[in-house]
Image (cartoon, rainbow, N blue to C red):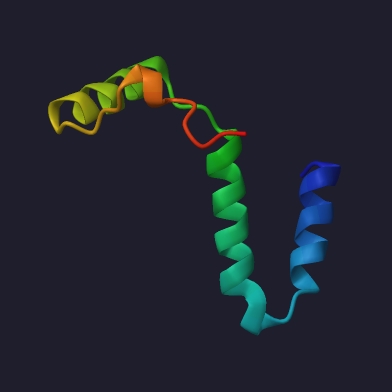
């Protein structure tokens, strides 16, 4: 086991059991936010959005960003 893995395990063991489901949700969300999809997955998702009409005009991309 790496030092980081062991440190993470040690921290998790100190969390009260009633908070473990929320910690698991946080860890999953973090992993999903830092993990990039493969090119194939990205293309498949883009195609699915196109087919289902989940598209937006390019001139509206920056609407509401200030």
Q: How many marks?
A: 0
Determine whether 7 is above or below 14 in the image. Answer: above
Residue 55 screen position, x and y as percent: 26, 28
Q: Quadrant of the C terminus?
A: top right
> Viewed as shown, does residue 44 lie left or right of 24?
left
Residue 40 screen position, x and y as percent: 33, 17
Q: Say which quarter of the image contains residue 17.
A: bottom right
Determine whether 26 is above or below 34 in the image. Answer: below
Residue drawn at (63%, 84%), measured in percent from left and top? 18
Of 64 and 45, nearer the camera is 64
Residue 48 screen position, x and y as percent: 20, 29
Residue drawn at (14%, 33%), measured in percent from left and top? 52
Of 46 and 32, nearer the camera is 46
Residue 11 screen position, x and y as percent: 81, 64
Residue drawn at (76%, 44%), measured in percent from left and top? 1
Of 61 and 3, nearer the camera is 61
């Amino acid at each position: 086991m790496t030092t980081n893995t062991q440190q993470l395990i040690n921290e998790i063991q100190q969390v009260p059991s009633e908070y473990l489901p929320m910690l698991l949700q946080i860890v999953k969300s973090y992993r999903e936010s830092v993990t990039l999809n493969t090119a194939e997955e990205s293309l498949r998702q883009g195609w699915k959005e196109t087919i289902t009409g989940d598209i937006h005009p390019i001139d509206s991309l920056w609407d509401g960003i200030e």
